[in-house]
């Protein structure tokens, strides 16, 4: 009888352990997904960003043409999100669009998300950082025909240049 009790106890403990290890893997999966998104309160963004960064990234504002620091910038490197440092664009996709804003013919795969924007009586496609949902700009289909035909018209304020190391 005692042996039987022990066996049941062992079985119970084993079941419990396997259950725990399953939970553990589920939790680690969840946290790895969560680490790819940055969720902050409005107050936290306000504290972290400069006034103009907040206005563009969180309030979907637009910097004045030919005033940003990257519209005429063509060094080798990459551009990351100014709010969460997510890799967004590489310098080899940047082209001179003469529109007064930094322009790229494509974004790094999976780096941005899109949203239909009907503001100001126009139909546009808004481009946002996939990680923090910060506003980057808009994408238009008047980009270079020889590559993608797209123009990711981006606010300098929303991005930060990181020079190539080699
Ligand atoms: Fe971001």
Image (cartoon, rainbow, N blue to C red):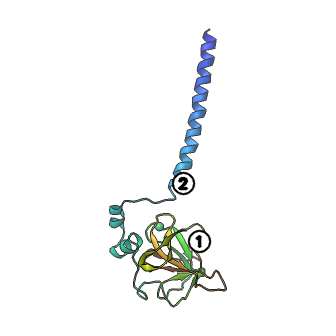
Q: Position of residue 17 (x, y in %)?
A: 58, 31
Instruction: Give the farthest residue toward the right.
Output: 146
User: Answer yes or no: do the residues labelled 2 and 1 have beta carbons within 8 Å?
Assistant: no
Q: Position of residue 60 (x, y in %)?
A: 41, 73
Instruction: Give the farthest residue toward the top.
Output: 1
**Vertical comparison of 65 with 43: above or below:** below
- Disc 1 under 8 Å from ligand 1? The reply is no
**Which residue occupies the foreground of this view, 41 or 162?**
41
Label 2 neighbour load within 10 Å: few <14, some 14-19, many 20+: few
Q: Quadrant of the N terminus?
A: top right
**Vertical comparison of 141 with 81: above or below:** below
Q: Is residue 53 left or right of residue 70?
A: left
At a point 64% along the width and 80% down the height, the residue shown is 148
Q: Quadrant of the C terminus?
A: bottom right
At a point 53% along the width and 78% down the height, the residue shown is 139
| Sequence-first tag of 2 and 1 | 2
Q: In 3D space, how far apart are the residues under numbered discs 2 and 1 (Cα atoms)?
A: 19 Å
**Vertical comparison of 48 with 101: above or below:** above
Residue 142 in which image quadrant? bottom right
* Residue under label 1: 108
**Which residue occupies the foreground of this view, 123 or 94?**
123
**Which residue occupies the foreground of this view, 145 or 157?**
145
* Residue under label 2: 33
Secondary element at tag 1: loop
């Amino acid at each position: 009888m005692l042996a039987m009790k022990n066996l049941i106890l062992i079985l119970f403990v084993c079941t419990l352990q396997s259950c725990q290890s399953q939970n553990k893997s589920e939790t680690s999966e969840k946290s790895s997904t969560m680490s790819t998104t940055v969720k902050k309160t409005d107050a936290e963004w306000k504290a972290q960003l400069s006034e103009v960064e907040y206005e563009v990234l969180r309030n979907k504002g637009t910097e004045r043409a030919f005033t940003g620091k990257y519209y005429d910038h063509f060094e080798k490197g990459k551009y990351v999100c100014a709010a969460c440092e997510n890799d967004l664009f590489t310098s080899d996709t940047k082209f001179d669009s003469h529109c007064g804003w930094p322009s790229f013919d494509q974004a790094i795969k999976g780096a941005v998300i899109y949203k239909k924007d009907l503001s100001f009586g126009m139909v546009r496609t808004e481009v946002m950082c996939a990680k923090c949902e910060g506003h980057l700009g808009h994408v238009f289909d008047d980009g270079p025909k020889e590559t993608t035909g797209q123009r990711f018209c981006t606010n300098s304020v929303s991005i930060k240049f990181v020079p190539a190391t080699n």
